[in-house]
Amino acid sequence: MSDLNMSDLNMSDLNMSDIREETPRSNKKLREALYGGALFLLAPTDASLRLVEAAGVQVRDVFKEFDDPRQAQHELDDGQFFRRVGELRRRLFTQENFHRAIGELVREKGFDPAQVAFDPIRIRAIAHEGHKNEAAAPVYYAHRDTWYGHPQSLITWWIPLDDLEEEETFVFYPERFARAVPNDSEIFDYRDWVRDGPELRIGWQDEDASKEETYPGVIGEVEPGREVGFRCQSGQSLLFSGAHFHRTREQESGRTRFSMDFRIVHLGDEEAGLGAPNVDNRSRGLALVDYERIDD
């Protein structure tokens, strides 16, 4: 696939001081802006709020004996907490109602469902002081999503289940969007990642996956440049290119952060070779072969 030429990028997007709250009128312009580095944090919609409610039902069911699932980590040991979150991951990743929810969301933003392939919903549970758990270290690596075998046309769609302060979310490094970061992404081969089945691919069973699997990361000391962070409301949608260099914050809010994300690819753009610039992604294999299609 040939990447979007650097001359085609709106370079002002790479020096933005904040995150945009409104999308362009056309979906084509939205995709072009995302491939150019724009970040969009959008107001909750009917579809996103229905998805948050459906996910919340599952969270409350898995942590049913706790009045507040966000506090459950304080009553469970690491293994118990991991297994509960693993069950949540399995449900949201595999159940058809969550697949249909993706279709509703992309339609709201003007995507043609016939042109969209998606990597299903993953729920994220970022625990209070989770960065102190050695097994969770890969969660906090600064990275690009494309380093994991995804195409340059990748769009990541992130939704929080709760209102979150800035220190509970993550940060982008927009000055590195179109500048290479020294990394070892060549060690990642998607075919190896999925060889033992999808349950290991998203980590709902294997507590030792972070010790045994290969996670690409930064090599050496890197000056990432200016940070762009954000606070958000439950049900907002954050859209960004999977080529963005970003990092989950080490949070000590006293509670677990629950959020969801899924990834989409516009198949027409992928076929035409459109997408974010590939400045340093050397991962192997193609995750797109396992993406789902929206069934009308």
Image (cartoon, rainbow, N blue to C red):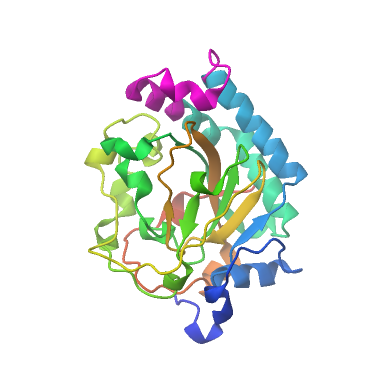
Question: In percent of the image, x 62 and y 29: which residue is there?
Answer: 56
- Can see residue 71? yes
Find residue 17 and report its horizontal and vertical position in percent.
58, 69
Find residue 82 and report its horizontal and vertical position in percent.
38, 27
Q: Main secondary structure of the magenta part?
A: helix
**Residue sticking out furthest to the bottom:** 7
Instruction: In this rendered view, identify the residue nearer to me: 276 or 12.
Output: 12
Quadrant holding the N terminus: bottom left
**Residue sticking out furthest to the top:** 65
Q: Is residue 109 above or below residue 35?
A: above
Question: In percent of the image, x 38 and y 74: which residue is there?
Answer: 279
Question: In percent of the image, x 77 and y 43: which residue is there?
Answer: 46
- Can see residue 93? no
Find residue 257 and report its horizontal and vertical position in percent.
51, 37
Question: In percent of the image, x 36 and y 60: which residue is there?
Answer: 147
Residue 121 in which image quadrant:
top right
Instruction: In this rendered view, identify the residue nearer to me: 108 or 81.
Output: 81
Find residue 230 and report its horizontal and vertical position in percent.
57, 54
Magenta segment boundaries in residue numbering? 63-86
Q: Is residue 187 magenta?
A: no
Q: Is residue 173 left or right of residue 190?
A: right
Q: Is residue 265 left or right of residue 254?
A: right
Q: Is residue 239 above or below residue 99?
A: below
Residue 34 in which image quadrant:
bottom right
Residue 173 in which image quadrant:
bottom left
